[in-house]
Image (cartoon, helix red, strand yellow):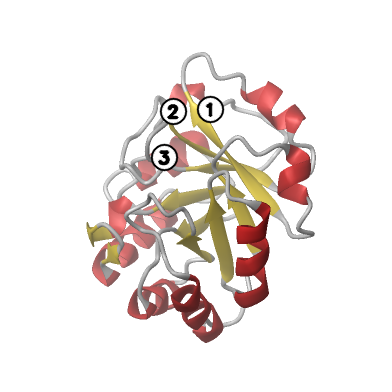
């Protein structure tokens, strides 16, 4: 099975088009106001409506109010939800859309316990512990924390770049990888060249 790729923190239409052209599987739109990659709903809608078929539009939320999520879902055609806060399984699942749950990876993280607490999750995004930014900080974590077998789809994130993603895919063999700052020239500004280099790195990591 090939490794899936999501490019997160898209803020511009041209960057979304670069993601599509690269062959990546998904884009991420950040609806967390404190993020430097936060996107307004109208802009997110414009980007989402211009994407090619078979590219999943993912909406990232951090402890968002239900009314906020509901309003965004009414305007933006999201195919996947991504939760980075303390949302419970029922809160994530109530929208009737597939979702993934972010897990901050530290030495004492009980990933099995987290996975059991989210039976409805389509997968789990393993990120570095970043309590203030909730991801997107370009920090890696010790990949030895990732179990060899989990029985659930795992998406590796946190500090991935064109320079290390091949090693990550080879060592971990994740279901997918997620990158944001690793393919940027500035927060929220993606580089088509870096995106293509990242995709090449994923492909050189092989299949699993």
x%, y% of residue 109?
A: 55, 19
In this picture, is 172 found above or below 93? above
Residue 65 tag number: none
Say which label, 1 or 3, has the lower sequence index: 1
Please state which of the two labelled residues, at mark 2 or mark 3, is closer to the viewer: 2
Figure quadrant of residue 120? top right
Q: Are marks 2 and 1 in contact (CB under 8 Å)?
A: yes
Q: Is residue 124 visible?
A: yes
Disc 3 marks which residue?
168
Q: How many numbered discs?
A: 3
Residue 146 tag number: 1
Residue at x-position 54% and y-position 42%: 84
Figure quadrant of residue 72? bottom right
Query: 10 and 2: which one is in front?
Result: 10
Residue at x-position 74% and y-position 39%: 89
Disc 2 marks which residue?
143
CA–CA distance in space, label 2 to label 1: 6 Å
Q: Is residue 121 visible?
A: no
CA–CA distance in space, label 1 to label 3: 11 Å
Please tell me how crowded label 1 is: few (under 14), some (14-19), or many (20+) other residues with Cα within 10 Å.
some
Horizontal side of residue 193 vs 83, given as left or right: left
């Amino acid at each position: 099975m090939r490794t899936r790729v999501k490019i997160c923190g898209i803020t511009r239409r041209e960057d979304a088009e670069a993601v599509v052209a690269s062959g990546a599987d998904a884009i991420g739109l950040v609806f967390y106001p404190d993020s430097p990659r936060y996107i307004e709903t109208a802009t997110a809608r414009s980007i989402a409506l211009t994407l090619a078929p078979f590219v999943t539009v993912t909406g990232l939320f951090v402890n968002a109010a239900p009314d906020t999520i509901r309003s965004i879902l009414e305007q933006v055609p999201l195919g996947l939800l991504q939760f980075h806060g303390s949302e419970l399984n029922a809160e994530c699942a109530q929208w009737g859309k597939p979702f993934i749950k972010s897990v901050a990876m530290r030495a004492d993280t009980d990933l099995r316990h987290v996975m059991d607490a989210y039976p409805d999750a389509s997968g789990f995004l393993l990120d570095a512990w970043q309590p203030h930014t909730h991801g997107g900080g370009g920090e890696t974590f010790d990949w030895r924390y990732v179990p060899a077998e989990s029985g659930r789809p795992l998406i590796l994130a946190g500090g991935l770049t064109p320079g290390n993603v091949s090693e990550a895919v080879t060592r971990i063999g994740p279901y997918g990888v997620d990158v944001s700052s690793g393919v940027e020239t500035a927060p929220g500004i993606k580089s088509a060249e870096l995106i293509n280099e990242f995709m090449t790195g994923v492909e050189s990591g092989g299949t699993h």
